[in-house]
Amino acid sequence: MTKDLAKIARDKKIKYFLVSFVDLFGVLRAKLAPAAAIEGMQKDGAGFAAFAAHLDSTPADPDMLVLPDADTLTILPWKPEVAWLTGDPYMGGKPLEQAPRWMLKRQIEKAAKLGYTVKTGVEAEYFLINPDGSGIADALDTASKPCYDQSALMRRYDVVAEICDAMLGFGWEPYQNDHEDANGQFEMNWKYAEAMLTADRHVFFKYMTKAVAEKHGLRATFMPKPFMNLTGSGCHAHVSVWNKDGSKNLFHDAKGELGLSGLAYAFLGGVVHNAASLCSMWNPTINSYKRINAPRTISGASWSPNTITYGGNNRTHMVRIPGPGRFELRLMDGAANPYLIQAGIIAAGLDGVQNKRDPGERLDIDMYTDGHKVKKARKLPLNLLDAIRLTDNSDVLRKAFGDAIIDSYIKLKMREWDEYCAHLTQWERDRSLDC
């Protein structure tokens, strides 16, 4: 039965609800509704103008109504009189199919028809910086190899512990927090789950991290490459496919190569085949391409892929197989829309399974030092425009998501590219004034 949000509000002393949705660019939008109004909102939805968000709409379109998913109810630990809910957008009484949560739902439905449940975990990296964005917030965090630096981690104990305590309270089963490879950069991990649950939690995690950082006078950013000399922020995804009721890992085969089944390799084949076409969703900003095509940073490595390869327990490849029964996709970055991360994984993987795609040869080399020796390795796009064009021309993605959704996404991303091209930089002036 659907949870009665009005009753929960009375029982939990909730005064307000944040009823939210995520648009195509990954921006979390919300309305703050008093608890007295939540009963009607649970029935009829919260009204939004879709054109005001990054959705392919016009001011002439009717209201977009977001029906809250009561199962996503999350009370804000730092403001317990407020509860957060995400939901599904409708327009004209029908699902707004271009909304990212619907895009993911449709891929989950396709997987379920084949008897599959996709489970994933994400590694969301972020920087803690000065509120004005001028640099990292910890002036003492200057080591050339700061990864796992205990002192730098503990100087941010109050922020990290508050976020981790919240995840423990939510039942997410967080299991480790660390200072990452860049100065001022952190990562927090929680247990993998079914893809929609992971995506919903990922959305809230990003909001919570920013809110807790602000509470402590800091700013959290998931920008892929905020500092050119430092390692960028990725959002690696660990992927496995289970049977329909989620009780058996179909990727695991003790006799298979590196503990993976034939299904796992076919799914991986789809990811390898479609990775470049998905870059505009998984690496969705202008800045993203300063991460995946980055030179060596002060720590000694960018930790980011630039070619479409896979290997065993080897972090220099786009895909790593760290152990039996799963693989890690290292392509996505911190700007990626949590729902499009998961929708893209499932769409690509199902394409691989249905078309029996071969991922090719596993490479057991250091791609950072010996990658130039691999003559047939496909390169990832060099910029957002190349990525957009690859998405636009992908028959696989058009079949998976539908022409209308892909056309809408391409239209909005091209506007963003055009805005970027209309911006004159100081670099251009410095290089060209004396031409």
Image (cartoon, rainbow, N blue to C red):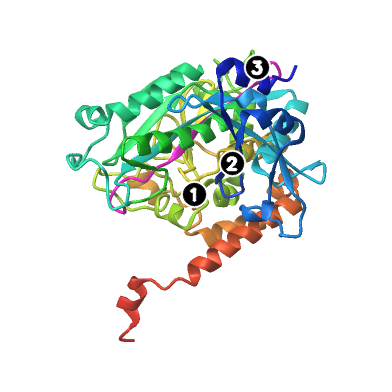
Q: Is residue 313 left or right of residue 344?
A: left
Sequence-first disc among 3 and 1: 3
Q: Is residue 239 magenta?
A: yes
Element type at mark 2: strand
Quarter of the figure with the C terminus: bottom left
Give the CA separation, mark 2 to mark 1.
Answer: 43 Å
Closer to the eye: label 2 or 1: 2
Q: Is residue 67 left or right of residue 212?
A: right
Q: Residue furthest front?
A: 36
Q: Is residue 238 something that shows in the picture?
A: yes
Going by the numbered disc 3, the residue's amino acid type is Gly
Q: Is residue 97 magenta?
A: no
Q: Residue furthest bottom?
A: 435
Mark number displayed over residue 246? 3
Q: Residue at x 37, y 22 (%)?
A: 176
Going by the numbered disc 2, the residue's amino acid type is Ala
Q: Residues within 10 Å of mark 1 (few under 14, many from 20)?
A: few
Tags 3 and 1 touching, CB below 8 Å: no
Q: Residue at x 81, y 42 (%)?
A: 94
Q: Residue 357's image quarter? A: top right
Q: Residue at x 60, y 51 (%)?
A: 277
Residue range of the region highlighted in magenta in the rendering: 227-245
Give the CA separation, mark 2 to mark 3.
Answer: 32 Å
Residue receiving disc 1: 377
Q: Residue 179's image quarter? A: top left
Residue receiving disc 2: 30
Q: Is residue 329 something that shows in the picture?
A: no
Is 189 located above or below residue 184 in the figure? above
